[in-house]
């Protein structure tokens, strides 16, 4: 989509931490994806070691590990891209 | 089916969500210094932030679960609500209406009515919108408690109060700013929390094509069975879809409902405001890949006894709303199950926060300042916005308890929109495009439209007139009646407004500068390549819409 306001450009980013500026929403999205993905992924690893806890269909595919990992990485990318950003 | 059994990991995911949104409310409070920050989020959002919030304000859990259940009943037909029933209106708002809204620097939709028409039209709309918003917020709260009680075995009272207090805390602190932040968090949680269930469903059944191969053909088409109401499950013809849903209800909601349009007002400039609904339209078109596909997956599974999948029953009735939660239970192990539940919770709470933030704005500017205290200072208005948030929450909890004691109130949800929004769209359309429409014409047209819609609803309800008379068909459903009633209400408002305008005093052209097409400077002064213009991106959205309709014809 031809839209100039993406994650990295919609905020000011001069590589200096502006303690008084507001963090962009994408930073918070990153945080919640990061921590939620972490919990889901770790639970998935536990479930892999102790299978049958949930008794769900397709449990053998370990969707919790790879989806939790995907969320964790997505969150990390959001946090990285907005680490020094503050909203104008 | 018994309640879902959540374990520690699921509760931890839910706790992270609650901790986050309350934390965001506290964090944003120090940036909410003025009434402009509180009611319009400082008017500094990018089009992406405003666009995702615009969509999320409408993307409640009630809708997600209801539409998945409706797909189980009606098939792919439900995609009409996401495609023709949304996208043309969103693009029209962006291209034609947003310049008037944004350039006039109004703070609410009733505020536009005041500028274009007069105070009485503004107050009429403000009161009806405020009542509708609180009703919807309360019913949303009740629906959340119902879902949590049914599927998780949670206490009614704890579910309602925990959600209401959480919303009260973060909306009171930072108003629209925190509502928008939490709506965007909700957007990501819904996609991450629910999209996987569709992926696993496809893997479980075999392939995307297998799903369509295993459902009746009439369930897999969008338009080819719309020639005869008896040939499709929704019992509605293409006329009802196009005029009722695609034109009146859709345009009435997406272009005039302050709940969603308020998000576009928070954009930092006119171009961003115009891009807001266009960006949202792409994600709106993608939503059927969760709700419609999820409903079809549930349908295929339920037809195969070996899967052991069947919907819940409430008494002798099938509980279609159980389709999505049951898919979560089927595919999501602990941890992921917590995410799925959180996605639904986030949908409910963001829906309530959206309604409350729209209510506090309309109450403060269009009722309190307009009628009760015309000389209120900005600081006082900020205080009033916070007070209105708390009062609105308390009233919505009262409405939720009322709904609990009278479950049929849920049936009125769709009807309420056709009473308030459908005629308002005629008032807006005429006001924006015709200079000679008068204030008295708008007031009496709006009153006639709202009254006739309500009257038709009551008349059919008590059997004074047949539903078939309204819907032009001997076969019709409640949904078809809603579509057609909206169309008649719009037409009556349109006609009465024009007729009364012939005989009443017109405003001068000078008074209408910036409010009516032809008298408004719509030029975007900043030169841009064509592919960055709202018009070009809107064309792409329109092409995708047409392609989807042809593919699923």
Image (cartoon, helix red, strand yellow):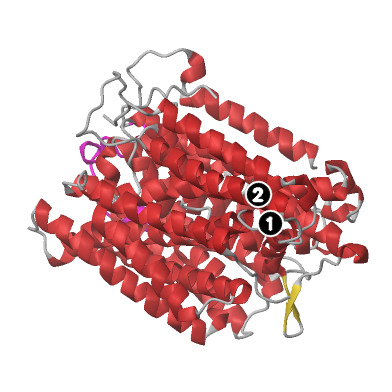
Q: Within 10 Å of the Cα at label 2, are there few (<14), some (14-19), or many (20+) other Cα atoms?
A: many
Q: Is residue B249 left or right of residue B522?
A: right
Q: How many marks?
A: 2
Query: Relative to B307, does residue B403 appear above or below in the rendering?
Result: below
The residue located at (86%, 50%) in the rendering is B205
Quadrant in the picture for residue B503: bottom left
Q: Position of residue A43 (x, y in %)?
A: 61, 51
Do tag 2 and tag 1 residues touch (Cβ < 8 Å)? Answer: yes
Chain where mark 1 sits: B
Q: Position of residue A72 (x, y in %)?
A: 54, 38
Q: Position of residue B134 (x, y in %)?
A: 38, 69
Residue A44 — which label? 2
Nearer the observer, B159 or B32: B159
Q: Position of residue A81 (x, y in %)?
A: 43, 26
Q: Which residues are magenta?
A: B500-518
Q: Is residue B157 left or right of residue B412?
A: left
Chain where mark 2 sits: A
The residue located at (58%, 27%) in the rendering is B539
Q: Is residue B292 visible?
A: no
Nearer the observer, B129 or A42: A42
């Amino acid at each position: 989509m031809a839209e100039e306001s993406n994650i990295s450009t919609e905020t000011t980013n001069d590589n200096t931490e502006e303690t008084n500026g507001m963090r962009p929403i994408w930073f918070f999205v990153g945080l919640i994806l990061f921590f939620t993905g972490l919990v889901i992924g770790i639970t998935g690893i536990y479930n892999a070691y102790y299978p049958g806890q949930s008794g769900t269909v397709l449990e053998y595919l370990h969707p919790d590990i790879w989806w939790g990992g995907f969320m964790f990485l997505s969150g990390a990318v959001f946090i990285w891209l907005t680490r020094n950003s503050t909203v104008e | 089916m018994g309640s879902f059994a959540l374990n520690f990991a699921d509760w931890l995911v839910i706790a992270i969500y609650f901790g986050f949104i309350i934390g965001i409310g506290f964090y944003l409070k120090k940036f909410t210094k003025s009434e402009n920050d509180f009611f319009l989020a400082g008017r500094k959002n990018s089009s992406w932030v405003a666009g995702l919030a615009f969509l999320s304000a409408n993307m409640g859990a009630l809708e997600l679960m209801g539409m998945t259940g409706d797909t189980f009943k009606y098939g792919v037909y439900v995609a009409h609500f996401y495609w023709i029933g949304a996208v043309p209106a969103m693009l029209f708002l962006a291209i034609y209406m947003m310049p008037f809204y944004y350039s006039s620097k109004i703070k609410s939709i009733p505020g536009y009515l005041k500028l274009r028409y007069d105070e009485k039209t503004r107050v009429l709309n403000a009161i009806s919108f405020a009542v509708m918003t609180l009703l919807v917020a309360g019913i949303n709260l009740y629906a959340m408690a119902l879902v949590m009680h049914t599927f998780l075995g949670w206490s009614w009272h704890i579910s309602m109060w925990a959600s209401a207090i959480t919303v009260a805390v973060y909306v009171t602190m930072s108003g629209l700013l925190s509502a928008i932040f939490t709506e965007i968090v909700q957007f990501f949680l819904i996609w991450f929390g629910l999209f996987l269930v569709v992926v696993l469903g496809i893997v479980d059944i075999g392939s995307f094509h297998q799903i369509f191969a295993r459902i009746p053909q009439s369930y897999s088409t969008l338009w080819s069975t719309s020639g005869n109401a008896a040939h499709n499950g929704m019992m509605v013809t293409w006329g009802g879809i196009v005029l009722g849903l695609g034109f009146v209800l859709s345009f009435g909601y997406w272009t005039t409902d302050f709940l969603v349009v308020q998000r576009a007002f928070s954009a930092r400039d006119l171009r961003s405001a115009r891009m807001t609904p266009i960006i949202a339209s792409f994600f709106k078109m993608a939503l059927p890949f969760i709700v419609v596909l999820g409903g079809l997956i549930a349908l295929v599974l339920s037809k195969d006894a070996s899967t052991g999948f069947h919907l819940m029953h409430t008494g002798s009735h099938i509980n279609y709303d159980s389709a999505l939660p049951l898919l979560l239970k089927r595919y999501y192990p602990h941890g992921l199950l917590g995410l799925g539940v959180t996605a639904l919770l986030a949908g409910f709470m963001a829906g309530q926060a959206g309604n409350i933030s729209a209510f506090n704005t309309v109450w403060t500017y269009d009722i309190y300042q307009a009628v009760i205290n015309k000389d209120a200072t900005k600081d006082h208005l900020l205080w009033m916005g916070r007070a209105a948030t708390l009062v609105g929450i308390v009233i919505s909890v009262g409405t939720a308890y009322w709904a609990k004691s009278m479950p049929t109130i849920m049936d009125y949800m769709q009807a309420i929109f056709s009473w308030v929004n459908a005629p308002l769209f005629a008032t807006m359309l005429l006001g924006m495009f015709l200079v000679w429409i008068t204030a008295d014409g708008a007031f009496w047209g709006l009153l006639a439209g709202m009254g006739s819609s309500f009257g038709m609803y009551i008349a059919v309800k008590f059997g004074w007139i047949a539903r078939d008379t309204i819907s032009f068909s001997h076969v019709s459903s409640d949904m078809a009646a809603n579509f057609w009633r909206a169309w008649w209400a719009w037409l009556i408002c349109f006609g009465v407004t024009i007729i009364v305008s012939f005989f009443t005093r017109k405003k001068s052209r000078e008074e209408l500068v910036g409010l009516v097409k032809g008298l408004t400077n719509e030029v975007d002064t900043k030169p841009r390549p064509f592919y960055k213009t709202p018009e070009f991106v809107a064309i792409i959205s329109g092409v995708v819409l047409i392609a989807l309709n042809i593919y699923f014809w």
